[in-house]
Image (cartoon, rainbow, N blue to C red):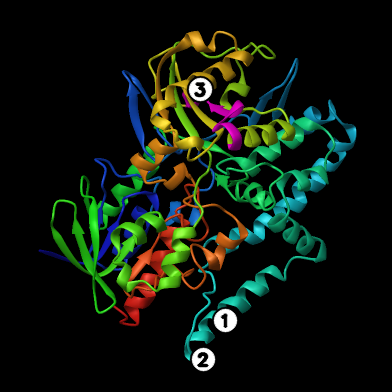
Amino acid sequence: MTKTDVVVVGGGHNGLTCAAYLAAAGLKVTVLERRSVVGGAAVTEEFHPGFRNSVASYTVSLLNPKVIRDLELHRHGLKVVERKMSNFLPLEGDSFSVGDGVTKAEVARFSTRDAERLDAYGDRLERIADVLRELVLMTPPNLVEGGLAQAVPELLKSAALGKRLNRLDMTGKRDLLALFSQSAGDWLDGWFESAPIKAAYGFDGVVGNYASPYTPGSAYVLLHHVFGEVNGKKGAWGHAIGGMGAITQAMAACCRERGVEIRTGAGVAEVLTRGGRATGVVTEAGETIQARAVVSNLHPRLLFESLVDPGVQPADFRERIGRFRSGSGTFRMNVALSELPRFTVKPEAGDHLTAGIIIAPSLAYMDRAYMDARTHGWSKEPIVEMLIPSTLDDSLAPAGQHVASLFCQHVAPVLPDGRCWDDHRDEVADLMIDTVDRHAPGFKGSVLGRQVLSPLDLERTFGLVGGDIMHGNLSLDQMFSARPVLGAGDYRTPVAGLYQCGAGTHPGGGVTGAPGHNAAREVLRDAKRRRF
C-alpha cells in the first residue's frame, strides 16, 4: 500500500497542469495514466515509418498564457509557431483565404458590403471575447444547499462575475445574449451576405460540435474558438514544434522537476471511499494508493459511472451525470504524404498550405452534412479541415515528404441501426480521402499511410465519450456553473475529497490547461482550510 497527498487520475494535459500547481504548493502528488504515455489526447506518435503527428488534438491557440508562464513550458522545450495564414477554403472554381492583410480584400471579391462590415464584426466579437477570457480562469459560482455560511462565498463570486460583465455597454450585452442563445448561422446571417466568409467563421460553430450551424447555441461554440492566442497574438492559431505531444511532454517535465510521481500503464479501477469521503484509489493491477484527495482528469461519466460507488452519489446527481450529453461527430485521420497537395483552384505551393484548409464552402453545406449524418451515420459530402503541420515543422516527416491532419465531420457518435464503427471505419476513411482528392487531384495517390480514428476509437483510446473532443457538449445547460452538473460546478463533487479537473468542467474543451489550473486552486483552498 502506497500513501500520497493527492492522486491525479489521468495524465492528460489538465491532469498534468493540476499536478504541477499542487506540487508547487508542497503537496506530494502521484499521477496515474492508463496509457503508456502521458498527454491524453494531446500526444505525438509515429503512425507510419518515419512519419509522426499529433494523434488527436492537432492545433494550438487555447492554451492559456498563464499556464504557459506558471509551468515555464518554454523553458521545458515548448515552441509554438503561428500559421502563416489562418484559413483557406477551396470553392467551386475559386478560393477564399482568411489571414492578416488578406481577409478584407478576399471578402470584397464576393461582397463590398461584407468587407465594410468586417472591422465592426471583429471589434464586437473581440469585446465579448476579452470579457470571457477573464472568466476562463474563474471558478464558477456554485449553487449550494445550506445556510448563509455556505451561500456567502458563492454570492461574492456572483457579484464579481456581474462586475466583469457590467463593463460591457448595452451593445455588448445584447451581443453576449445573442452569442449564448443563437445559432452560429443566425448570428452570421445577421452580419454578412456572402457565403465564403460565413463558411470560414461558421466552421468554428460546428468544429467538435455534432450540430448544424443553425442549431441554437452553436454561436457560443464559435465564440469559444476565438478566446485563444499564440505568442501574445489574440485569435491566432499555431503549431507546436514536435506536435501537440510537445505541450504535454513539457508539462510532464515541469511536474517531474517539482517532484510529481508520474506512472504510466497504471489505469485506475476504483476510487476508494469511506464515510462518504474519497480515500484513495485501486489500480487495475490491484495496488491500493491512499490519498488525502483524489483529482480526476477523466470524462465525468467515466468517473462516476465506472469508478465511484453509486451508493455514495446522490441519486439525482448520478441520474444527471448519466444524461450529460457527449458526442462531437468527429472522425480523425493522420496521413503520410509523398508530396504536398495541389489544389485545382490554387495549385502552386504557398502560405495557404500552412492554413486550416476547410472543405465546406457554405453554411448550407454544413447543414446538409449534419442532417445527412443523422440519417445515414455519416455525411456523404463531409466537412473536412486539413492541416499540413510539416509545412511549419520539418521534424515530422522525411525530407520532401509531409504529414497531414484531417479533422472530419459530420459522423454520428453512435451509428444508427445497430451498426458498429469497426465495420465502417475504412469505408468512411476512403470517403474523407476522396473528398480532399476532388479539390486536390492526386492527393489520394500521394497517401503513403494513414491512421484512422472513428468516434469509437477516440473513446476507447483516449476516453473521449462519444468521440467528443470537448468532453461534453458546450450547450447552455452544460456550461459554467452547470458543467458538468449544477451544484458541482466548482471542481468539487458530492463526494468529499474527490475533485474533477478535466474538460468536463469549466471552461470546457480544447487544450487550455484552464480546468487543471482552476481545480488545483480549489484543492489548495480546501487543503488550507483543512478540509482534507
Residue stretch in magenta: 374-392
User: Where on the picture, by quarter, is residue 207?
Assistant: top right
Gap between marks 1 and 2 measured at Cα:
12 Å
Gap between marks 3 and 1 measured at Cα:
49 Å
Q: Label 1: state its secondary structure.
A: helix
User: Could you tell which of marks 1 and 2 lies nearer the N-terminus?
Assistant: 2
* Residue at the image position 70 percent from the left and 39 percent from the top: 201
Q: Label 2: state its secondary structure.
A: helix
Residue position for label 3: 391
Callout 3 amino acid: Thr
Callout 1 amino acid: Leu
* Numbered label attached to residue 148: 2
Q: Nearer the viewer, residue 464 or 1?
A: 464
Residue position for label 1: 156
* Residue at the image position 36 percent from the left and 45 percent from the top: 40
Q: Label 3: state its secondary structure.
A: helix
Q: Percent x, y for residue 81?
A: 51, 35
Q: Indicate whether residue 378 is drawn in magenta.
A: yes
Gap between marks 3 and 2 measured at Cα:
58 Å
User: Of tags 1 and 2, which is closer to the observer?
Assistant: 2
